[in-house]
């Protein structure tokens, strides 16, 4: 490998001595940003039932608010924003700060909505703001961390998913019971505006930290959008990971919303009880699973690249029957306990999958590759998961009444075998397709 290629392959090797400290600071701040990202996005799940009662919504309308209203604009704007983030002259830090300010403000505005239409447009605003965060964040991390450490670094960032969901469930449930759902939304939205200032003042764009004498060498050749797309979709492993991750998101977002409604409707829990119970499952178990997936990929991926995805593939296959039993149980305590292991196993994919995506393409296409993953996960997953789960629940309600959600979740449990298969198929191609940088 030439000196030039070595520099391109590992940005962190050419950064100043303070780069390691800056990388740790960057990862910590990005984690907090992603926590707010999911806190603002997912708090609607625990507030779904009180919002439904207050605004007189159907399950279909509730699913529309939780899914397509957010996901369609998030997905459509994600790719052009990511294309901007991939440009050498762009400032990804400022992009993340602006995105954070927009979605935080719109989350607070959700609390002011007086009807379905107003809440719909406010949720669209949240989706527009959040579209600029994760592709730029993944690109920043990949430019700052050695390739062999990317799974755990991206998994660390991915901890924002379960932690944000955990905080959303706890804060949303407690504040709703005390002050109502409107106050809960405004309470979680406002701090994000201050966090946007923290991002601007304490994070630096790695492209601007490079020494002047290496900047020209490290600047990769420009790649057109068409070239980036062709390189991305030429990878069979990427296509398999995209399919698997999209199905994971479809099931995950659907279950995140309707499992809470299931415990409230079928087991008679309050929003606080459901929020605290699901915080254990979706929060603590998700944190452990996300961390474990990244760590396992780091350890076993060094020995054989296909093992980067082995744990997510086999874990999801094991999770399916246990998840079914959890929804089947009549004692809610037993049900919650049985959901812990599947949540750990289903959360393990984040770091390995997104690290593979960053390694399957050149640096000029990394943010776009991440945005395509998010396009699939959000348009298919968040866009249709909660919505179609709600539609099915309405269709089954005449037969099963309050238990209709339980039967929808039965089917969702077994569908987890689909992403398990595609992650396994992707793992078989990693040895040939993963790049060194």
Image: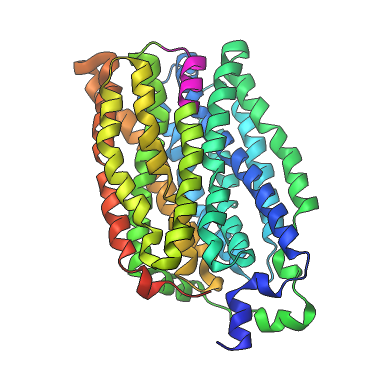
Front in this rendered view, residue 153 or 114: 153
**Does residue 21 lie above or below 255 as drawn?**
below
Front in this rendered view, residue 341 or 69: 341
**Does residue 156 lie above or below 336 as drawn?**
below
Q: Is residue 302 magenta?
A: no
Screen quadrant of the N terminus: bottom right
* Residue 241 position by quadrant: bottom left
Q: How is the image coloured?
A: rainbow
For the point 46% across and 76% down, the residue is 227
Overall secondary structure of the magenta stretch? Answer: helix
Residue 266 picture location, percent across and down: 33, 15
| Residue 141 seen from this side | yes
Task: Left or right? Give the position of 387 relative to 146.
Answer: left
For the point 50% across and 65% down, the residue is 358
Residue 153 picture location, percent across and down: 57, 56
Tell me where the magenta segment starts and ends, as one range.
269-279
Residue 429 picture location, percent across and down: 32, 69
For the point 40% across and 36% down, the residue is 343
Q: Is residue 272 magenta?
A: yes
* Residue 8 position by quadrant: bottom right
Which residue sits furthest bottom? 2
């Amino acid at each position: 490998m030439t000196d030039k290629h070595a520099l391109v392959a590992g940005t962190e090797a050419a950064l100043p001595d303070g780069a390691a400290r800056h990388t740790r600071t960057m990862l910590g701040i990005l984690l907090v940003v992603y926590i707010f990202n999911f806190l603002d996005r997912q708090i609607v799940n625990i507030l779904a039932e009180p919002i439904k009662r207050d605004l007189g919504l159907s399950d279909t309308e509730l699913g529309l608010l939780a899914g397509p209203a957010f996901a369609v604009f998030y997905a459509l704007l994600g790719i052009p924003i990511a294309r901007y983030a991939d440009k050498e002259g762009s400032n990804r830090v400022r992009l993340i700060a602006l995105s954070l300010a927009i979605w935080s403000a719109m989350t607070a505005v959700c609390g002011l909505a007086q009807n379905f239409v107003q809440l719909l447009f406010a949720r669209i605003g949240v989706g527009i703001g959040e579209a600029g965060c994760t592709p730029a964040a993944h690109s920043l991390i990949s430019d700052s961390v050695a390739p062999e450490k990317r799974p755990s670094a991206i998994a660390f960032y991915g901890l924002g998913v379960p932690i944000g969901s955990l905080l959303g469930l706890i804060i949303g449930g407690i504040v709703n019971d005390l002050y109502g759902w409107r106050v809960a939304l405004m309470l979680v939205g406002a701090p994000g505006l201050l966090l946007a200032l923290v991002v601007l003042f304490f994070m630096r764009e790695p492209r601007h930290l490079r020494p002047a004498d290496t900047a020209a060498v490290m600047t990769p050749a420009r790649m057109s959008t068409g070239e980036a797309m062709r390189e991305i979709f030429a990878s069979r492993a990427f296509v398999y990971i995209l399919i698997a991750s999209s199905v994971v998101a479809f099931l995950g977002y659907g279950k995140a919303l309707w499992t809470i409604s299931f415990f409230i409707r079928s087991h008679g829990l309050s929003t606080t009880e459901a929020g605290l119970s699901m915080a254990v499952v979706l929060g603590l178990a998700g944190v452990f699973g996300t961390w474990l997936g990244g760590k396992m990929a780091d350890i076993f991926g060094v020995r054989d690249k296909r093992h980067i995805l082995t744990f997510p593939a086999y874990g999801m296959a094991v999770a399916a029957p246990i998840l079914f039993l959890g929804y089947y149980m009549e004692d809610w305590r037993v049900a919650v306990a049985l959901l812990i292991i599947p949540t750990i196993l289903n959360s393990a994919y984040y770091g390995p999958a997104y690290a593979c995506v960053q390694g399957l393409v050149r640096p000029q296409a990394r943010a776009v590759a991440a945005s395509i993953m998010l396009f699939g996960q959000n348009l298919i997953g968040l866009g249709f998961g909660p919505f179609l789960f709600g539609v099915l629940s309405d269709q089954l309600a005449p037969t099963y009444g309050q238990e209709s959600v339980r039967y929808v979740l039965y089917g969702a449990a077994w569908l987890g075998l689909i992403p398990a298969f595609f992650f396994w198929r992707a793992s078989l191609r990693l040895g040939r397709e993963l790049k060194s940088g």
